[in-house]
Amino acid sequence: MSAKIIDGKQIAADIRDELTAEVSALKERGIVPGLGVILVGADPASQSYVTAKERACEKIGIYSDDNRLPAETTQEELLTLVAKMNEDPKINGILVQLPLPKHIDEAAVLLAIDPDKDVDGFHPMSVGKMMIGEETFLPCTPNGIIQLLVRSGVETSGAHVVVVGRSNIVGKPVANMLLQKKEGANATVTLCHTRTKDVGHFTRQADIIIAASGWPNTVTADMVKEGAVVIDVGVNRVEDASRERGYRLVGDVDFEAIKEKASMITPVPGGVGPMTITMLLYNTVVSAKRANGVD
Ligand code: GUN
């Protein structure tokens, strides 16, 4: 079998078209959704994510307040900026790009964000509400994965989903979201991680595999059941002298081999990546509507 490639770029473009229409309708009512973006330090991957987020905002008509701070920024300075954005009525969403430099307490910064502006869904209040199935901002990559599955017609109800990776940003929340008693969820979920004794033992039973380990080739073809759906969250730079920039991007799964066995698979790039930004835009529009009492 040769897998259907799930086109994240196209699905993201469809959602962004829907959002563009919503943003112009809001503008007619004098409402401009705004996103406050904070990047501390000069990590190249983070810089390119933040640039992509700002471009995406501009493209659909969301105002973005760009703050690129030096790596030496103190925690106090960062908290002051977050407090200012919490009070700023032009800002509906606050995004602090992670990871932060080691001298800054990430948990303290996330806690300082007004939960009503927590468009990343990382505040403990948002995480708690997500866990008990209450309405809240859902974290962007996990929500993007679920949108990819739903819009590709993948049935999650009753499916066995095996998540590989237990990060707070992807693995833990996506596992949690998929076991909720709601549409686009209702799955039986197994969460594998670095101390799991035999990851393949679990992934071979999976109807859906979500690879979010942060390492190339974590999932190989022998670990995949014939006909499974494979979602690859990884974005890894591997050296490649044949490329002008000296590297190429690969995911966490062995794409070439697995695509001969899976029924559907996401590519890297062009799979989950475009969805993360799209769900951030979505949360920002939802936040602007809530702040202005628009249904
Ligand atoms: N770092 C990696 N992914 C993300 C994300 O979705 N949001 C933020 N703020 N930082 C990240």
Image (spheres, grey):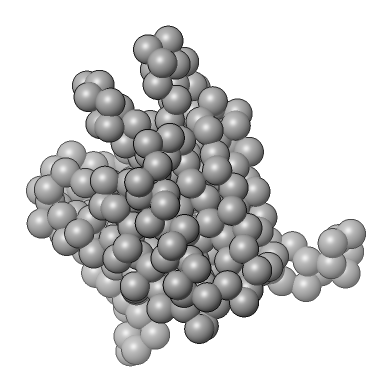
- Left or right of 251, for residue 163: left
The residue shown at (50%, 68%) is 77
Q: Quadrant of residue 231?
A: bottom left
The residue shown at (42%, 57%) is 82
Q: Is residue 79 above or below residue 145?
A: below
Q: Is residue 273 above or below residue 61?
A: below
Image coordinates for residue 174, horizontal then vertical, percent: 30, 58
- Left or right of 154, for residue 274: right
Image coordinates for residue 260, horizontal then vertical, percent: 55, 55
Res. 243 in view: yes
Q: How many marks?
A: 0
Res. 18 in view: no
The residue shown at (43%, 35%) is 90
- Left or right of 220, for residue 94: left
Between residue 84 and residue 122, name the one nearer to us.
84
Q: Is residue 19 above or below residue 277?
A: above
Between residue 142 and residue 203, name the one nearer to us.
142
Image coordinates for residue 40, horizontal then vertical, percent: 58, 66
The quadrant of the image that shows the C terminus is top left
The residue shown at (54%, 39%) is 64
